[in-house]
Structure formats: C-alpha cells, structure tokens
Image (tube, rainbow, N blue to C red):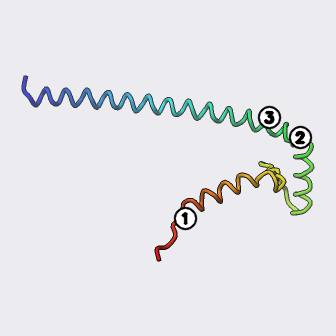
C-alpha cells in the first residue's frame, strides 16, 4: 500500500471516532439537561409549598395585580424577599473578596 493511502485511512478512522465521541457527549448533555429540568420542576413545586406560596395565594396576587393594572395578568414567578439579616454574612463575604482583589496604586 502507498503511504498516502495508509495516512488517508488512519485520518478517516480518527475523524470517525472523534465524530462518534462528539455524538456521545451531546447525548449525555441532552440527558443531563432533561434531568436538570425535571429536578428543577420538582424542586420549585416543593419549594413553593415549603415557603408558604399556595395556589390560593397565587390567585389572590393575580387578582390584586389585575385590579391594580386594569388588565389581565399571569403570575409566573413569585419571589419572597428575605429579611435583611439573613443576607448580611454573604454580603460581608463578597465585600471581603472584592477588597482582597483591590490593587493599591504605587506611590
């Protein structure tokens, strides 16, 4: 066999295997996304019931928003605002991190 034929066969095999690996990785990515979406739906339903957001409360909020705005409203997301004390430690941690990256000008 010619050197060029052997090189062509080797390159073809390598490219086919790489294409197969890319396909497998995309398949794993699709499976992971589906599992993440399913887990997020289950978590949001559980979190909504744990935080005290009931379907009745959603209906009341939608009715209040409809009355205030004068048009039909669909409530898609409810975010509860935490008291200020719960975020203090995370805010202080971010400030410390930002201060550690600060570069003082040379004098």
- Label 2: how many residues lie within 10 Å, few (<14), some (14-19) or many (20+)? few
Name the N-terminal-most of marks 2 and 1: 2
Whether residue 44 sits left or right of residue 35 in the image: it is right
Q: Relative to 103, is 32 above or below?
A: above
Of marks 2 and 3, which one's residue comes earlier in the chain? 3
Badge 2 marks a residue whose secondary structure is loop
Mark found first going from the N terminus, 1 or 3 = 3
Q: Which disc number belongs to residue 102?
A: 1
Spot the residue most to the left: 2
The x, y position of residue 9, in whole percent, is 19, 26
The secondary element bearing badge 3 is classed as helix
Question: Residue at horizontal 89%, vertical 40%?
Answer: 54
Q: Quadrant of residue 5?
A: top left
| Residue at the (65%, 36%) spot, across then down | 37
Q: Which residue is mark 3?
A: 46
Please name whichever residue, 102 or 86, is drawn nearer the observer in this view of the structure. 102
Contact (CB < 8 A) between labels 1 and 3?
no
Residue 16 is drawn in which quadrant?
A: top left
Identify residue for label 2: 54
- Residue 97 location (% of width, % of height): 60, 56
């Amino acid at each position: 066999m010619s050197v060029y034929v052997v090189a062509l066969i080797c390159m073809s095999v390598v490219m086919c295997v790489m294409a197969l690996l890319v396909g497998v990785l995309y398949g794993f990515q699709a499976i992971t996304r589906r599992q993440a979406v399913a887990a997020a739906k289950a978590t949001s339903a559980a979190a909504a019931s744990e935080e005290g957001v009931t379907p009745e409360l959603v209906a009341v909020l939608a009715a209040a928003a409809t009355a205030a705005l004068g048009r039909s409203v669909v409530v898609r997301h409810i975010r509860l605002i935490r008291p200020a004390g719960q975020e203090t430690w995370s805010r202080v941690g971010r400030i410390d991190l930002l201060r550690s990256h600060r570069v003082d000008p040379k004098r």
